[in-house]
Image (spheres, helix red, strand yellow):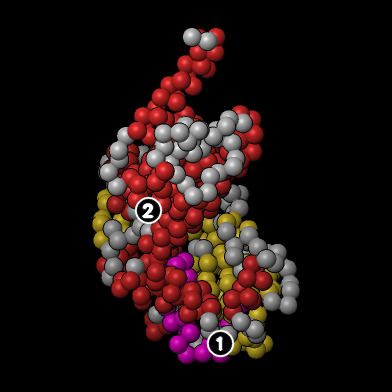
């Protein structure tokens, strides 16, 4: 027995080779047909890119975000393996003695052996995916394990190479998850909205009625158990669809505080009811994206319960368009986030029409393809001047983000409209892309952005859709956009 074998490295190397040889000698049914092909499919991350694309088409918004985190985790793991990992250890590849010829790869890898890049990529993508969408992660976990095992099976890696790569991939997924959470927490920082004086404090929830949209995003698991535990005397009403507007109006008329659990469209309907009844609003985030709640600084039901119990609230501005969604009743419509005419409402209208038949992901892709092939922009009159636009966007407050693709706001109490135009002419795809690369408050040949208190829009072509807070409705022939500073009292922790 040599000196090397007396050391822990020698013992580890001996066990590594023993496991490698054991895999080589073992007969694995169907392995010769499946495993080498699976390993080749994972070259350069192609397999995981395909999985991410499939999830983008078939999955929910949450699953698509998880797939994006998985792709970022894969990129981090691959960069680490190909820089620090491969060049710090420089372990030679295993000798192929004993590995059946039928298993061996036609082209052998030329890089060093430790750690396994395939295993790192497989476990990084799957970990990043599983942390955001456990169901999809569980479905792909056997594939990731098979890809990792295929590297030993085909004789290109020792088992320890694969184990180290898998551990590195899991670590990359956890790192990306932590970074994403850090970004989300930074977004939850409260803005400089003016504090609401005299907001009712409801320590046990008496006087609060919460209307839950059971058909919205994640409302069924949005922390209603927390609400019932923290504010036990609050009334909870569950409904969806045509019942929602009526239930919100009735709840606002009889309650001290109107509560709502749902996504941005549901929150918009609740804000409309609260504004008309003159009561404060308590938002329990229950949609897929929850833009308004995030921009307000609400992380979940616990935050809202704490604010309602303490009477902590702020005053926020609301965007208004007149006439509203139902021009016959003569009343205005409101938007807490965004209002738009042009490419986005058309895309939204088509997606909502096709989604029940082919699913949300395919409907969104088909709608985008149809809209980007459009030949005519919308011709209308803005502030008395004829204009041709691919997109008219108005935000309730100034949004961060370039061009016509805003992302978040620092304050909901600004009392200004963030107005952006993508000029007509050319094709919509290149124009919208060019606008996305332009600064948020600038002018260019394709894009204009400014901040206003009001804007008159006229000569809107019949059949033109408009969108507000994710809802879509036919636009009237003319309307006025304006903003109502400090119009709505909304609960938020101090």
Identify the residue shown where x is 38% and y is 59%.
Answer: 59
Residue 413 % position (x, y): 58, 57
In the image, which disc is placed on residue 337? none
Q: Position of 484 compared to 63: left or right? A: right
Q: Residue 81 at what x, y percent from top left? A: 58, 38
**Image position of 158 with respect to 209: above or below:** above
Residue 151 in the image: state x and y as whole percent.
45, 40
Report how many numbered discs are placed on residues in the image. Answer: 2
**Quick check: can you spot residue 390?**
yes
Task: Give yes or no for residue 462 being in the magenta stretch.
Answer: yes
Q: Residue at x 63, y 60 (%)?
A: 401
**Label annotation for residue 375:** 1
Which residue range is magenta in the image? Answer: 451-476
Q: Position of residue 66 (x, y in %)?
A: 44, 50
| Local secondary structure at mark 2 | loop
Q: Residues within 10 Å of mark 2 (few under 14, many from 20)?
A: many
The image quarter in which residue 326 lies: bottom left
Q: Residues within 10 Å of mark 1 (few under 14, many from 20)?
A: few
User: Disc 1 versus disc 2: distance between alpha carbons?
Assistant: 38 Å
Q: Earlier in the sequence, mark 1 or mark 2?
A: 2
Location of residue 317 (image quadrant):
bottom right
Residue identifier under label 2:
286
């Amino acid at each position: 027995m040599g000196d090397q074998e007396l050391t822990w490295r020698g013992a580890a190397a001996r066990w590594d080779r023993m496991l490698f040889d054991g895999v080589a000698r073992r007969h694995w049914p169907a392995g010769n047909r499946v495993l080498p092909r699976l390993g080749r499919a994972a070259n350069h991350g192609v397999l995981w890119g395909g999985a991410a694309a499939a999830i983008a088409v078939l999955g929910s918004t949450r699953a698509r975000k998880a797939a994006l985190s998985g792709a970022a985790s894969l990129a981090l793991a691959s960069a680490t393996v190909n820089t620090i990992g491969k060049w710090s250890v420089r372990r030679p590849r295993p000798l192929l003695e004993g590995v059946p010829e039928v298993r061996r790869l036609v082209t052998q890898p030329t890089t060093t052996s430790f750690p396994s890049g395939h295993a790192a990529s497989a476990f990084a993508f799957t970990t990043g995916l599983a942390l955001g969408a456990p169901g999809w992660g569980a479905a792909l976990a056997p594939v990731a394990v098979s890809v990792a095992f295929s590297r030993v099976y085909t004789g290109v890696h020792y088992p320890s190479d694969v184990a180290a790569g898998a551990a590195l991939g899991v670590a990359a997924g956890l790192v990306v998850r932590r970074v994403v959470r850090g970004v989300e927490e930074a977004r939850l920082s409260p803005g400089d909205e003016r504090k609401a004086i005299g907001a009712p404090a409801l320590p046990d929830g008496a006087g609060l009625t919460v209307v839950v949209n059971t058909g919205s995003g994640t409302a069924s698991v949005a922390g209603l158990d927390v609400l019932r535990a923290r504010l036990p005397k609050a009334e909870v009403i569950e409904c969806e669809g045509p019942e929602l507007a009526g239930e919100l109006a009735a709840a606002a008329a009889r309650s001290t505080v109107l509560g709502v659990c749902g996504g941005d469209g549901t929150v918009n309907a609740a804000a409309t009811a609260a504004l008309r009844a003159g009561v404060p609003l308590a938002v329990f985030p229950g949609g897929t994206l929850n833009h308004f709640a995030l921009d307000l600084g609400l992380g979940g039901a616990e935050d809202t319960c704490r604010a309602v119990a303490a009477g902590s609230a702020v005053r926020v501005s609301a965007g208004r368009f007149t006439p509203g969604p139902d021009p016959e009743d003569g009343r205005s419509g409101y938007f807490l986030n965004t209002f738009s005419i042009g490419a986005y409402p058309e895309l939204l209208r088509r997606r909502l029409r096709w989604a029940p038949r082919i699913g949300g992901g395919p409907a969104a892709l088909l709608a985008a393809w149809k809209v980007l092939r459009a030949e005519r922009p919308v011709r209308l009159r803005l502030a008395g001047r004829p204009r041709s636009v691919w997109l008219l966007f108005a935000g309730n407050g100034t949004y961060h983000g370039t061009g016509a693709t805003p992302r978040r706001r620092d304050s909901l109490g600004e009392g200004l409209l963030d107005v952006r135009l993508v000029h007509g002419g050319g094709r919509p795809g290149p124009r919208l892309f060019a606008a996305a690369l332009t600064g948020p408050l600038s002018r260019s040949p394709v894009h204009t952005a400014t901040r206003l208190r009001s804007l008159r829009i006229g000569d809107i072509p019949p059949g033109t859709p408009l969108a507000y807070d994710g809802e879509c409705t036919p636009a009237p022939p003319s309307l006025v956009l304006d903003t109502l500073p400090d119009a709505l009292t909304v609960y938020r922790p101090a």
